[in-house]
């Protein structure tokens, strides 16, 4: 069935953008200091948050091909639509990184002049020790390669799936299309590349803000955050489309499986949050605890609150089988923890960029609403450009008759 973006959906996107813009402007005019750096910090938060959750859709799509998962075939178009926001998210992220490289922002201290020169009064021995990795030429090589390869795979998966739709029966041998076989091979290459690049990009774009600090768990922690955000968007989209009488082949069994993923990854994120904190707290090494000290001093409610919201809500509300199939339980939990993961990225960025001047205010809410409005419009428009069913997929019929 073909999806058409309704005027109501378009209006919702426009309203979010306009409300966000008004809130953003109100916040700017009432902010009496650090306005420019605050805007750059918010652009980094939103660009990273929405770009990486879109990237996670490519990851989950590749996982489905490699594992030959039948149950998720009826919802593949959802993930293809989510990844359509990647170019916009990448543009926002690159804008901040370029500005930082040109010293319009002061987020990445290791980019400052003289920090690796022993003759300079700005010399920093710790940064100098990391300069083989943290230097602008190598940083930009990694950034361009990572984003370029990710965008290539996202575009390839989408085109390959649409080309599969256009095949006639004479081009499908033994019920398996050549496009499907190609997708499996390409997924293997993507996942190998993604295994390193997703972690390294988190080091580069987020962890290096606090350049004196490092954590071996940070990359996986950031990855789990973008994955759960993606699964939340997928669940909400499926429920929205089902409510509009689309996705007739998607049943409560598919919704149940999607929510199980949402629940499981939420627990994974909670585990990594606690494991990273507990190990550093227990060791009590000053170089490591400095990262947490500033967050507990200036952002304690947001930082700790994010953990408890993300862990307790799914654990107590979505534990049962029936709750995982009931939109009354699913939607409130999904929307709340989605915003909580936005706050999680905000608390990753603000302490090292705005220090004790950062807070959740009109600027933050305004820019989030603007990005959310553009994101919703982009994803829904992508859904309207192709059939919601992946025709000629060899496992589509098996997915339709899923029972859990």
Image (cartoon, grey):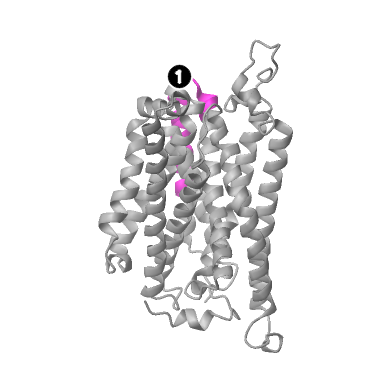
Q: Which residue is drawn at 60% across and 43% down?
A: 201
Outermost residue toward the front in this view: 283
Magenta residues, start to end: 15-38
* Foreground pick, 236 / 244: 236
> x and y percent of residue 402 in the render?
42, 79
Question: Any magenta on residue 20?
Answer: yes
| Mark 1 residue element | loop
Q: Is residue 104 visible?
A: no
Q: Is residue 223 left or right of residue 325?
A: right
Q: Which is more toward the observer, 402 or 122?
A: 122
What residue did someone put label 1 on? 32
| 382 shown above or below 272 | below
User: Measured from the top left, where is residue 26 in percent x and y?
Assistant: 44, 30
- Residue at image location 54% in from the left, 74% down from the top: 2
Q: Is residue 164 visible?
A: yes
Quadrant location, the C terminus: bottom left
In the image, residue 224 lies in the stretch drawn in magenta: no
């Amino acid at each position: 069935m073909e999806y058409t973006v309704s005027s109501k959906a378009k209006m919702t996107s426009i309203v979010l953008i306009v409300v966000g813009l008004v809130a953003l402007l109100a916040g700017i005019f009432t902010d009496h200091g650090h306005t420019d750096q605050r805007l750059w910090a918010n652009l980094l938060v939103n660009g990273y948050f929405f770009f990486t959750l879109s990237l996670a859709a490519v990851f989950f799509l590749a996982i489905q091909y490699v594992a030959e998962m039948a149950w998720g075939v009826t919802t593949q178009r959802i993930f293809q639509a989510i990844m359509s926001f990647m170019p916009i998210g990448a543009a926002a992220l690159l804008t901040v990184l370029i500005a930082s490289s040109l010293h319009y922002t002061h987020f990445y201290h290791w980019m400052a002049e003289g920090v690796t020169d022993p003759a300079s009064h700005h010399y920093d021995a710790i940064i100098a020790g990391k300069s083989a990795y943290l230097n602008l030429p190598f940083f930009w090589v990694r950034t361009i390669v990572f984003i370029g390869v990710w965008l290539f795979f996202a575009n390839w998966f989408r085109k390959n799936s649409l080309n599969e739709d256009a095949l006639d029966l004479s081009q499908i041998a033994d019920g398996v299309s050549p496009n499907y076989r190609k997708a499996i091979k390409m997924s293997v290459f993507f996942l190998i590349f993604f295994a390193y690049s997703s972690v390294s990009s988190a080091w580069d774009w987020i962890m290096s803000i606090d350049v004196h600090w490092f954590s071996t768990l940070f990359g996986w922690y950031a990855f789990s955050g973008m994955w759960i955000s993606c699964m939340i968007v997928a669940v909400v989209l499926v429920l929205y489309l089902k409510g509009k009488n689309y996705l007739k082949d998607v049943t409560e069994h598919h919704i149940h499986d999607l929510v199980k993923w949402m629940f499981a990854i939420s627990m994974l994120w909670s585990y990594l949050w606690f494991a990273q904190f507990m190990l550093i707290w227990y060791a009590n090494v000053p170089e490591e605890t400095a990262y947490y000290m500033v967050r507990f001093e200036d952002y304690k409610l947001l930082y700790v609150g994010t953990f408890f919201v993300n862990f307790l809500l799914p654990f107590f509300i979505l534990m049962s089988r029936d709750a995982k199939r009931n939109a009354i339980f699913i939607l409130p939990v999904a929307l709340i923890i989605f915003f909580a993961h936005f706050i999680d990225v905000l608390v990753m960025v603000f302490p090292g960029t705005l220090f004790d001047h950062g807070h959740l205010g009109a600027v933050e809410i305004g820019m989030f609403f603007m990005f959310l409005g553009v994101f919703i419009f982009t994803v829904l428009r992508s859904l309207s450009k192709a059939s919601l069913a992946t025709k000629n997929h060899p496992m589509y019929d098996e997915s339709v008759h899923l029972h859990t």
